Image (tube, grey):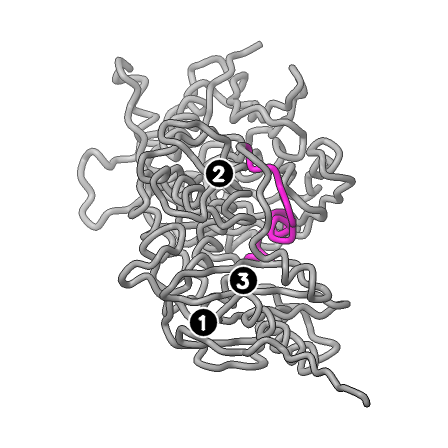
Amino acid sequence: MLTWCFLMAPALAFSAPYAGLVMDARSGEILHSENAETPLHPASLTKMMTLYIAFEAVQHGEISMDDYVTVSRNAAAEPPSKLGLRQGQKIKLRYLVRAAAIKSANDAATAIGEHIAGSESSFAARMTRTAKALGMKRTTFKNANGLTQSGHLSTAHDMALLGRHMVYDYPQYYNLFSRITEDAGLRQVSNTNRRFLGAYQGADGIKTGYTNAAGFNLVASAKRGNERIITVVFGGRSTASRNAKVAELMDLGFKRAKTNVAMRKPGLPPYLGNRGLGNVMIAESANPDPEGARGKTIRVVAAAPTRSLRPLARAGAKGSDVAPLVASVKGDIETVLAAVQTAKVKAVSEVAALDVASAGDAPDASIKPMRRPADLAGVQLASVRGAVLTDAAPTPEQEVVTRLSTSGGHHWGINVGRYPNKFEAEKVLLKTSLMESSTLDGSLRKVVGRGGGYDANFIGLTRETADLACRRLQARQVMCFMMGPS
């Protein structure tokens, strides 16, 4: 007598409201949607945005992965899942990032947000602003970790958009989400998504989430050949049933996805950080950070100007010295940038097309020095030199005065930092020259290797111009100091 045994698949039941979505990551096309626009509790899917902003802040020099973060009482008191941080403890940001991405540690996520914005509430406001900039129209964040809070809501569609940006905007960090275990400083941590990563072919991320109110959530991504599918599920009853539903939707996505689809990566959102380098940004698809992956592309992005900053006069400066400086300050940097962008976009676009090949994970091995375009010097920033900020009702203080330098010629320079490799120094010089074109026009960008690093210098300036350029850059929170004649 034969006995037939049937293996029953896990019940695809949902205790919380269910939502599901399948997206072709290459184009953003929606392949399947169910309740995908319904605002629901995202739980720890929230940490995707916390990490996205952390990566963005590192990218723009706002913070560093090697920053030591002091753990607050608020962060240390977060409930599990947690890394086990203690109040007053200092820990490197990179370990907090790993703990938040891999273990989904609530204390680590809160500490990241507080380090970037000063408080979790300020960081949550920035998270919401960034969400809107990414097109996440129905998302509002109230905290950095996803613990249930009134008004803290998102949708399956919005989380798919965020997942897609995570894949393509910061590929140098995306590999974090596929690591099964990792050193988080205090201890090794294991990936909360390890079951799906190990069971589904091509799966490489992204983030799990669970609370009583949300159920079991997952934003998953898998790549097979040149096809990449992002699937979102809200409201699973268990890890097993959620993973089974995600696998089912993934299969549906790969079945419906077209074989040949033009890659249309999402555009980077405007940089909303309050400690960044202003309205000119250089965004890169990879970063020579030890957390990074391979392949590097530089894109120059000019965001819309918001305001013009006027540096304060030097304390104790004589009136005769200040007059030409104050007059030069009238050169509105945003006007200059707009003129550069519209009149010389062809030259700038050549910089955007530069590819920097990577040879490994180590910073020095992965970056080749950035080549300076031959015709970049021909941008003729002089055509916009002296642009002034015009008010509706001029006053005597707004009169523009010019005079020749009396400081002994163009023998002065400025230094805007020392960097670990020539590529980084060249990148900062290019960014700074576009940012402060009205005073740096005509200067020479020069990288000098010394002391185990590379100094980023502008030379060939008068003393007044070097001093003015430094003060304007410092007003934008860019490090700068003058160099006298050698």
Residue plotted at (68% across, 46% down): 293
Which of label 1 and label 2 is nearer to you? 1
Q: Can residue 16 be seen from the camera position used here?
A: yes
For the stretch drawn in magenta, what is the main secondary structure?
helix
Q: Pointers 1 and 3 in contact (CB under 8 A)?
A: no
Tag 3 residue: 163
Distance between the alpha carbons at the discs numbered 1 and 2: 53 Å
Q: Residues within 10 Å of mark 3 (few under 14, many from 20)?
A: many
Residue plotted at (42% across, 15% down): 406
Relative side of 16 to 257, left or right: left
Q: Amino acid at mark 2?
A: Ser
In the rendered image, the vertical position of residue 218 relative to residue 78, given as above or below: below
Residue plotted at (45% across, 37% down): 84
Secondary structure beneath dot 3 equals: helix
Q: Amino acid at mark 3?
A: Gly
Q: Can residue 337 be seen from the camera position used here?
A: no
The percent coordinates of residue 53 (x first, y second) are: 46, 49
Bounds of the magenta span? 164-185
Tag 2 residue: 437
Q: Residues within 10 Å of mark 1 (few under 14, many from 20)?
A: many
Relative side of 222 to 384, left or right: right
Which of label 2 and label 3 is nearer to you? 3
- Mark toward the start of the polypeptide (2 vs 3): 3
Tag 1 residue: 235
In the rendered image, the vertical position of residue 373 relative to residue 249, given as above or below: above
Distance between the alpha carbons at the discs numbered 2 and 3: 37 Å
